[in-house]
Amino acid sequence: MTDFLKLVSGRQSDRSFDPCHPVEKEKIERIVEAVRLAPSACNSQPWHLIVVDEPELKNKVADTTSSRVLGMNHFTKQAPVHIVLVEEKVNFSSGVGGWIKKKDYAQLDLGIAAAHIALAAHAEGLGSCIVGWFDEKKMRQLLNIPESKRVWLDIVIGYGTQALRTKKRKSREEIVSFNNYK
């Protein structure tokens, strides 16, 4: 197995973190660098990352992801770092191309950036979970994000405490065909 396949096979969405084990700044800097180098349509790079590692603010950001009614995302408070992914405007080429092809290239690019964050975190020995459920209005207020900007994801990072789970995936035959659509 290649090193990359080992990396991908070992990465999982962690929902339990050691809250007493802070993440080293140099690891966060390398994760951010991995996103800076990520590909995007027409090199548009339509993202802004907000690294939240100040404990009190981090807990308030985590509160925006929790739902008492649905009983979800309470683990986010354990993670010592949140990387909030904000959509920025695409460049002219990407915008025109997206309009012509009726594709939102910014969303695709943000997905690529999120994958880079999750894989880079795993390469650093950290766990992560990509969280899309949060109160966007409260998140904007907490982090001084302009109303004109869209907050796409909150990626929590820390030292995971969960054992590696077996991945449940569709078979190759269900998802791949060669030379035509099956």
Image: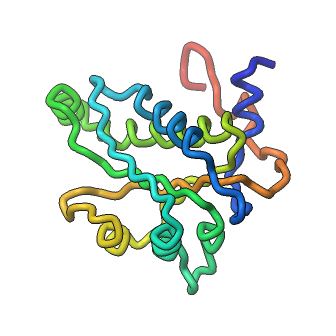
Q: Which residue is at the far bottom?
A: 69
Location of residue 113 by image quarter? top left
Q: Quadrant of the N terminus?
A: top right
Location of residue 115 by image quarter? top right
Return the residue nearer the eye: 1 or 34.
Answer: 34
What x and y, as percent, mark residue 178? 61, 16
What x and y, as percent, mark residue 37? 43, 26
Q: Residue at x 38, y 47 (%)?
A: 49
Q: Residue at x 40, y 42 (%)?
A: 110
Q: Quadrant of the C terminus?
A: top right
Q: Residue at x 53, y 34 (%)?
A: 30
What x and y, as percent, mark residue 121? 62, 41
Q: Residue at x 48, y 57 (%)?
A: 154
Q: How many marks?
A: 0
Left or right: where 67 falls relative to 84? right
Left or right: where 75 falls relative to 54? right
In the image, residue 24 sits, relative to residue 182, either above or below, namely: below
Return the residue nearer the eye: 33 or 114.
Answer: 33
Return the residue nearer the eye: 34 or 137.
Answer: 34
Specify how the rendered protein is coloured: rainbow
In the image, residue 19 sits, relative to residue 117, either above or below, namely: below
Return the residue nearer the eye: 178 or 8.
Answer: 8
What x and y, as percent, mark residue 180? 54, 18
